[in-house]
Amino acid sequence: MKNLHEPDQMRGDFELTRREFIVAGTAAVALTALPGVGRAQPAATTSQSALPLTKVSFNVNGKLRELELDSRTTLLDALREHLHLTGTKKGCDHGQCGACTVHIGERRMNSCLTLAVMQQGASVTTIEGLGTPENLHPMQAAFVKHDGYQCGYCTSGQICSAVAMLREIKAGIPCHVTSDLTARPQLTAAEIRERMSGNLCRCGAYANIVDAITEVGGKSA
Amino acid sequence: MKPFTYEKPRTPAEAAAATARHPGAKFIAGGTNLLDLMKLEIEAPGHLIDVNGLGFDQIEATPEGGLGIGALVRNTDLAADERVRRDYAVLSRALLAGASGQLRNAATTAGNLLQRTRCPYFYDTNQPCNKRQPGTGCGAIGGVNRQHAILGSSTACIATHPSDMAVAMRVLDATIQTVRADGATRRIPIADFYRLPGDTPNVENTLQPGELITHVTLPKPVGGAHVYYKVRDRSSYAFALVSVAAIVQRDGTGRVALGGVAHMPWRIEAAEAELPQGAKAVATKLLAGAKPTEHNAFKVPLVERTLAAALLEAKG
Amino acid sequence: MKFDTPATTNPIDQLKVIGKPTDRIDGPHKTTGTARYAYEHHEEVPNAVYGHVIGAAIAKGRIASIDLSAAKAAPGVLGIVTAENAGKLGKGEFNTAKLLGGPAIDHYHQAIALVVAQTFEQAVAAAQLVRVKYERSEGKFDLAAVKDTGVKPKPGLGGASDTAVGDFAGAFAAAPMQFDATYTTPDQSHAMIEPHASIAKWEGDKLTVWTSNQMIAWSVGDLAKTLGIPKENVRLISPYIGGGFGGKLFLRADALLAALGARAVRRPVKVALHRPLVTNNTTHRPATIQRIRFGATKDGKLTAIGHESWSGDLPEGAPETAVGQTRLLYAGANRMTAMRLAVLDLPEGNAMRAPGEAPGLMALEIAMDEMAEKLGLDPIKFRILNDTQVDPEKPERPFSQRNLTECLRTGAEKFGWKQRNPKPAQTRDGRWMIGTGVAAAFRNSLSMKSAARVRLDNRGMVTVETDMTDIGTGSYTIIAQTAAEMMGVPLAQVVVKLGDSQFPVSCGSGGQWGAHNSTGGVFAACTKLREAVAKKLGLDAKTAVFADGHVSAGGRSVPLGQAAGPAGLVAEDAIEYGDLDKKSQLSTFGAHFVEVGVNAATGETRIRRMLAVCAAGRILNPKSARSQVIGAMTMGAGAALMEELAVDKRAGFFVNHDLAGYEVPVHADIPHQEVIFLDETDPMSSPMKAKGVGELGICGVAAAVANAIYHATGARVRDYPITLDKLLGHLPPVA
Ligand SMILES: Cc1cc2nc3c(=O)[nH]c(=O)nc-3n(C[C@H](O)[C@H](O)[C@H](O)COP(=O)(O)OP(=O)(O)OC[C@H]3O[C@@H](n4cnc5c(N)ncnc54)[C@H](O)[C@@H]3O)c2cc1C
Ligand code: SF4
Ligand code: FES
Ligand code: FES
């Protein structure tokens, strides 16, 4: 196996780039995958209509939404770019930050790591579906009260995550810090912290977020 | 992402037919690993077969007294299942130590087993990587390799398998049940499921193209104290540097498997005979032939210490 | 308004609105997803198309050829911008490397092209079809290896490269107690959750960019300069910013390429840096190597203080000014500091939260702990013993205010320091080895000109406009509080509009200078507006009282709305500074206390308690200020325990360039955090009598953690981050 990083090979031309690999390796796939689309179309004549669009419909915040989408569209981009529900945030697009957390059914999920077409018929709740500035959801109100955010970019994800997370505790779903797997998990700070760890906050509002969730969880428990 | 066509079959037969029609197609389950990689064109299937309509989402008792876990059972549900919590606690623990609440809600049993390495060179398509692009070299050898394997690695690849769940499955002697495009089914013991990198690190397991995982079965419970001890730099939402799955019986005998150290969950049955002698003896056998890299020599003492801690915890 | 004499009593001192822990006024928007960030302006720009940035695949060298044909032919592609076809571009004042590279490549993931397509998916896919051939050249990527080639950097924001007072060498050699150690801090990433993003739209030769930027005026200037167009033709709008921490102080590739892309395809274009690109494409906090030497008397008085720091950056870059605080923090007659800058071909180093002080104190405050131990002194006593009330390099300059000792004492009391066993490795809690640590916090408070415009309408509504930004700091709220206090109206009567280059130029958000300067500017504008109101009504501005929505003087009381009349009133002014900050040293102080548990088997460190005591002038809003501090403490915890951009020293890039690879603290890493603000006002700082606090919070945290780890284990780690591999060899055997 040759190693491109052997010192003697590091000098000179580094030609094998990603783009060459890919063109060489998978161009054929792209062709077969795009029925009806010729390869050498000049840019001027290409348009969105050249795309094989897929129909998809799902319920978002109580409303049925029907879309025609490029099958590559993630649920996150469908929400943000097609439905203009920009409350759901894109922090990493790779499941690494939690900013895109929404509810699919009752469950919290990273909307960046699911395709919109896979959610045909699903019920999606986003931050916009929880409350409005005039009529805040109790979790939203608690975040305001406890200053559970700073820049606000992780906040939608934190709030959606928190609301569903409380349901998970109620349903008896254990977590990494649950000491007795056979007992019902309790609403403790340690439980909240572990369960919320899929939502990064670089502003570091964690301690305040835990206070907000504790207040809401305590009330609803 | 490369364009692809998409279908969501309703039956395994339909799914099998779909794989026959579309060589190079990929199944998608939770999507949490496949989509991640498709966005970077590390995976570029021309056709996606969404397996979420196939059922396979139940956990059922087997006639042998074990559990049959549907390939599509979500990691959250598997970890929360009463029987798993009671009889296979190491599996619950391993699942709960992985990823995040959101990801576990999406991730499936089969997808988790088949997730690919988190080697950063594998993830950076500008870099050489034999696993991603055979023949280009290995960026991690001589590069940044703190997370990488110390056991079973090759001169072609030193990546680790990142799954926590798989380590527990290994210690539980799980069996993977599949159906092939031609309809044939087979049962693969997990010990035979994963491959070491050798000269073909791109081939990670013994599945054939188009082969669908339908279930993972667990033999009947073996009792004992179950421990999954995961060591990582931050407290949560991080892959293991080293992990230990252990089942220890009252008499001190038991089983152990390691995560974070090799291209597969690492279990050497012969090492388990040393369990009554304590962690050091077991670690010595488990780590025989260990080849740490520039940045991960610490994993050698860490394995021993984590194992010791896990055994202590098992004692209660 | 010129601020050149210390503040006397003014309307802010009423503290009816200022100083209250008010909920943020932008809270209901941020918590409902209705606050619009850079990439989210569908309403203003309904027809934007998508740009995707391609980053260079090599660290140094040149592009031999670039073949766009396959990408151009891909579905939906509207155009591709490269250096070849972008026309002549300048380089911004604040940029070291070019934002659009090619043919020369200066660093890994430097942008080399923007692919614009109808949809996001098409742009991303087409970008993969661009074929680039590179000629790689040798680069320097290892700070330790090039350290000795470092030269004296030009004096910059961090001051001169070298300072010396007395005879350091002689005093050090003669000191009965000596200490000499070297520390390293790694490259770190801002890792803000919102990636850099922009939407650009041209109307004729006028350009509007919705972006995510901390410093509107700087970036208007740099965008104009880079494009070679007049500043007047550029408008930047940045009402909400999803975190910056210094990473969005400057014009970056997203904004430039969106502008170029929009020009090329004659449509508005939106661009967000995809996460794997952010780290190497944008700036980072540079790594340092720091040597610290102390000489002291036997009873613990420092007689010699030496601090040297080495860092690297691209050619024409700047050093990490890690010795800055050492010039001011402790007394000692003989002292020297020096910074050396070597050339590294890694991505561009630049400011990250508390540049200079954050990494500087990571080293200095471990050294203080080590020295205290050597002297057999309690680390708090040792710091208090060497406190100074004057600039130690220029003793004729007093600190405007310095309550470091008070911070340390208050914190010690609150944290239960008395109960601490000074000997390390003595306390166990099951499998956890427990330790506590302390460190001083220090960060300068900078005076920066800042302007605002204030409008009063006939309903008595007050509207503030300034190009100030709110990066999570709470600017919206404290500016509203300032205007409400000044005009005597309830908070609900104030509207705050920020982050638009059509508004008066503010200080912007950086260097913890935002709060006191931007509110100072609002104070100035409101003072003018009060005069205008008084004048219009024929009242004496000096004695007029603004309260309860009315202005009253000489027995008359008029509702403000009525005073404004149908046309309304407008006033604009700026706060400008004299030489108060030269005559005295304006700094903020604090003390951090941390308790850790170190897993005796695995060496994993988990923080159990954190306390910060801060002395930072008047606290305008204790709620948002506290949030700034806990957030900074969290980042400090990350710096201590996990944050490190791992350098591939052969290929020359940061390998862990995403949010899974570059670990920042998660919820489970952060315990309850306590913050105490000392009750103080600093009349030398501004009419607000406030100073910055958002960066003070990170200063010293990592060292407090390091000292706590030492106390827990007896293992002294001088290389950050303190990951378990560095502790394993020092831990007791596992039973
Ligand atoms: C940020 C982040 C952190 C993470 N941390 C951890 C961690 O700490 N520990 C850990 O263990 N994991 C971790 N994960 C990984 C996560 O567990 C996996 O992504 C997940 O388990 C994959 O399951 P999935 O159903 O989403 O798989 P998919 O992404 O749908 O599929 C993965 C692979 O399996 C194939 N596949 C799926 N179903 C079948 C089937 N029935 N038959 C045959 N092939 C199939 C797919 O074709 C694909 O190749 C993390 C992931 C992310 C993004
Ligand atoms: S270790 Fe394996 S996955 Fe990583 S770069 Fe080398 S070949 Fe690729
Ligand atoms: S955007 Fe989905 S997890 Fe970060
Ligand atoms: S509020 Fe800024 S990232 Fe959480």
Image: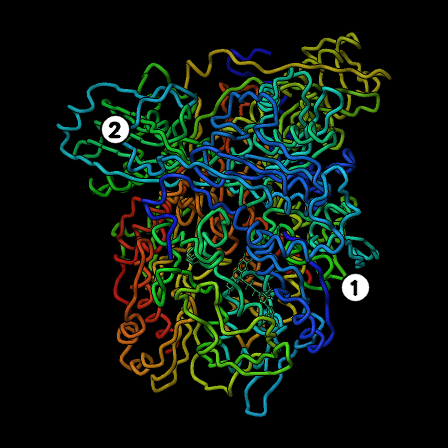
**Image height check: is C519 above or below A51?**
above
Determine the chain carrying the residue at label 2: C
The residue tagged 2 is C306
The CB of the residue at mark 2 lies under 8 Å from ligand 4: no
In percent of width and height, residue C193 lies at: 57, 44
Ligand 4 located in image quadrant = top right
In percent of width and height, residue B115 lies at: 53, 64
Q: Residue at x 25, y 19 (%)?
A: C165
In-front residue for pair C93/B193: B193
Specify the label residue A121 is tagged with.
Answer: 1
Residue C617 visible in the displayed image: no
The kind of residue tagged 1 is Gly
**Image height check: is A86 above or below C160?**
below
Residue C126 visible in the displayed image: yes
Q: For residue C340, which quarter of the picture?
A: top left
Cα distance between the residues tagged 1 and 2: 68 Å
Tags 1 and 2 touching, CB below 8 Å: no
Say few, some or many: other residues with alpha carbon within 10 Å of mark 2 (under 14 / 14 to 19 / 20 or more).
many
Task: For mark 1, give the secondary structure.
Answer: loop
Task: For mark 2, give the secondary structure.
Answer: strand
